[in-house]
Every structure is written in structure tokens, then in C-alpha cells.
Amino acid sequence: MSNRQEHPHFNDWFQTHGITEVECLVTDLTGILKGKIMPAGKYLGGGRPRLPDSIFIQTVTGGYPDDDDIHFWNPAERDMELVPDPNAIFLVPWADDATAQIIHDCHYLTGEPVELSPRHVLKRVLSFYEARGWKPVVAPEVEFFLVKTNTDSDYPLEPPIGRNGRQESSRQSFSIDAVNEFDPLFEEMYDYCDAMDLDLDTLIHEEGAGQMEVNFQHGDPLKLADQVVMFKRALRETALRHGMYATFMAKPMANEPGSSMHLHQSLLDAESGDNLFTGENGKSSRLFQQFIGGLQHYLPSAMPLLAPNVNSYRRLMRTETSGSAPTNVEWGTDNRTVGLRVPVSTPEATRVENRLAGADANPYLVMAASLACGYLGMLGQLEPRPPMIGSAWSGGHKLPDDIRPALDMLSACQPLAEILGERFTNSYLAVKRAEHREYFQVISSWEREHLLLRV
């Protein structure tokens, strides 16, 4: 197998944009971009860059699971080649020199794909759909907070100061003026996103102080996952240039709502383009019902992929400040208290919105997990429970309330492991359990405050 770059498209694109440097990017389990930076000439004329496959068993702090937890792992840390996707090439618009950032797939030197790569996991799930002539379509909505810079992690985060010189102190959902407080930042963000050809749709102010939401146009799941990853990077960079942070933590501030990554999903016939979620007379189809049945049955076990961190479950607690984060897998039409909302739409746009994922989740794994659950429902012809009428806050089937029971549920769900990949699932469980152990070694300020002199 040749390891030379063989994409003439890159040569033309590099020349058109005057590219002098290339960032070769791979997304790890957490969603962190890793890779190598190379001169453009060397990238085009040399061999494919390589990385060790161990980047896919790293924890968010850069550590690794214990040996006992990764007995299935190859301790040699095999090399993998980074194979560029010509449909995932973007400018780095904030770079001083003309720079390209390219998302890569990972293959071993034998040519086999690296099954631990989150991008491969999504492609694997999409291959099951393709084999049946189905084409899933998604539209993600990503929430985030702008916060004041914070260099001491012992201090709570605070809302940033806007153009009027003051911090937000009240809920300002959908306020245009509240968004305009950060006009210079968002104007530059949109300029960057335009230069990167990201398909952003709308920007709104969400419930929390300094909390915003960006919606993406609907399209191919792999393309949209790439775009969410690129958007996160662009927004963080823009915020830093304006003296603040952008954070996608699920629950960054105790007294503010959490941030989600809602995912609208529909299903097309790959040949005709017809929406398979629409049946006769514009009613929902049996496939639509079975897709929801699969989400209801399997999403509780898939929660570690949608809520991957200890902090993720703070967003899903029912408190006065939890906002509209769902705690159930019920479904209903135009109902924001359920985890699976069916928006009012034309028959051609029939879809279901999965509202469970946090903004902190890896977008490849969110889409892979949600589509896997729906696929299993259609495959097993699972029927959903009746739609929820009214509020689902006090009822409905509950989700795991912490990362540890969530990991146990994923570990016990063999159908999900089979569709996501056994080796990937085992690796993911090992990494997340290692992170949980590391978190438990940290003594919190709450413990010092209430236990130090009282027990």
C-alpha cells in the first residue's frame, strides 16, 4: 500500500489559497483535536503522517487506563497513518500564514481502519444504513457559554462583560440586545465560519447568562460532525481574541442551565430522496415509530456517549436552574419536556429531535450512538410507548443519574457494542472508568466547607 498523498484536489486547493502550512487533525474520544503540523510542500510530496494508536485510549487529562482495564489492548502502540478526507479540508482563517486544517481518518499500515477512532465509529454506523438503502440526515444545535477568563480553577466561572460594561444578571432567552452585547466577537466568528465554509444557520441567546446557541443546516451526519468539531475550535479561538473563554462544558456554572447538543434526525430513501419517516396521508411511518422505539429502548445504555463526563450529569439533574434539560426518554409532539421531541413540520420534514446529549460530547459519537439506537429499533421493529401529553418532568422512564451507572449500562448492552464495535466499546469504557477514578481522588470545596470541622 502506497503511503504517498494521492489527491490532486489538494494541490489545486493549496495553490488557490496559497497554503504554506498544514494541520493534520484527528479527533480523540473526548473530541480533542490531535495531530501534526507540516509544511505544505512536505505534506503534498512526502508520506502520510503517522501517530500512535494510543491517542484513542487517553483520558481527558492525558493519562491512560490501568493495564487490567485494557488487557485487550496492543501494548506496542502501533503506528497508524493519517489518511486525509478531501471533503474535510478547511482554512485556518486566524493564522498569520495561509494554513489548511484537514480532518483525517486513521488506518494501520496494513490498510485496516483504526476501529477506535470516533470518526470511524460514525462511518461504521452509517455503513449499516447504506447497506439498506437508507440515508440519515441530521441537524445539530450546539449551546455554549461565554465566560470571563479564569486562570484559577478553584474559582467559579462568571459571565463576561459585554459592550455596556456590565455582566448579565438575569435570564434573557432569545434577547437580540443580549446577543448584540457581544457583536464584535460574533461578527468575527461568522467571518471565520464563512472562510471555513461552515453551514451555520441561526444564532440565539439561550436561557443562561452569556449562554448562546448555534444551529446548523441539516445534512450528512459525517459532514455535520466535522463541522461541529471545526466550529468549536473556531469559537474558542474567537473568544480568546476578545478576552474571554467559550466553553462547551455541560454545566459550567452552578446557578445557570446546562448546555446541550440537540440532534434533529430524519431518514431518506437513498435513491428517491423521499423521507421514510413519512407514511401515507402525511402521517408518521412505521419506520419512524420503530426508530423512536429504538431510541427509547437503547438510549439509556448509550448515555456515556451523549453525557461522557462527570459534569455531564449535573446538567441532567432536575433543579431550579436546570432549564429544559430532559431527564427521560419519552417522546411527544412539540413538547420540550421530553427527551425525544417531534417538531411540528411538513410531512417532508418529519424528524425527531434527540435532546439528551450535552454540548461536551464528541459529535461523532453523539451521532453514531443516536443513529445506532434508532437503527436497532427499526431492525428489531420496536414499538414506542405512547407519546407524552403534557409535562414529562415528574414521570417517564429515567436516565442514569451519574457516569458510573451509565457505564455499567453500556457495558451490559451487547447490541450497542456490536454496532459500534466491540473493541471501541471496551476502550471507551476503560477510558471513562479511568477518568472517574481520577475525579474521585480530588477533594472538592464542598467537602472542605461542610465536613472539615463537622464530622
Image (tube, rainbow, N blue to C red):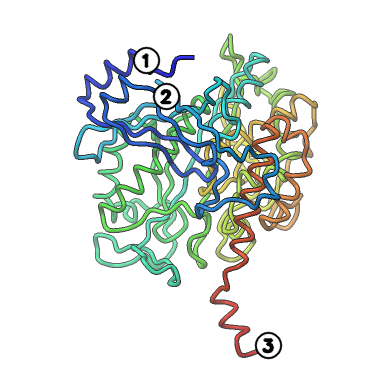
**In-front residue for pair 392/35:** 35
In the structure shown, which secondary structural element does the residue marked by tag 3 occupy? loop
Residue on which the image places disc 1: 7
In the structure shown, which secondary structural element does the residue marked by tag 2 occupy? strand
Residue located 49% across and 14% down the image: 1
Q: CA distance from mark 1 to mark 3?
A: 66 Å
The location of residue 351, given as percent across then percent down, is 60, 30
Category of crowding for the residue at label 2, using alpha-carbon neighbours closer than 10 angstroms: few (below 14), some (14–19), many (at least 20): many
The residue furthest top is 271
Residue located 62% across and 66% down the image: 440
Q: Indicate left or right for 375 with 262 as reference.
A: right
The location of residue 348, given as percent across then percent down, is 57, 21
The residue furthest front is 76
Name the residue type under label 2.
Answer: Pro
Residue located 59% across and 13% down the image: 270
Residue on which the image places disc 3: 455
Disc nearer the start of the sequence (2/1)? 1
Disc nearer the start of the sequence (1/3)? 1
Name the residue type under label 1.
Answer: His
Disc nearer the start of the sequence (3/2)? 2
Residue on which the image places disc 2: 84
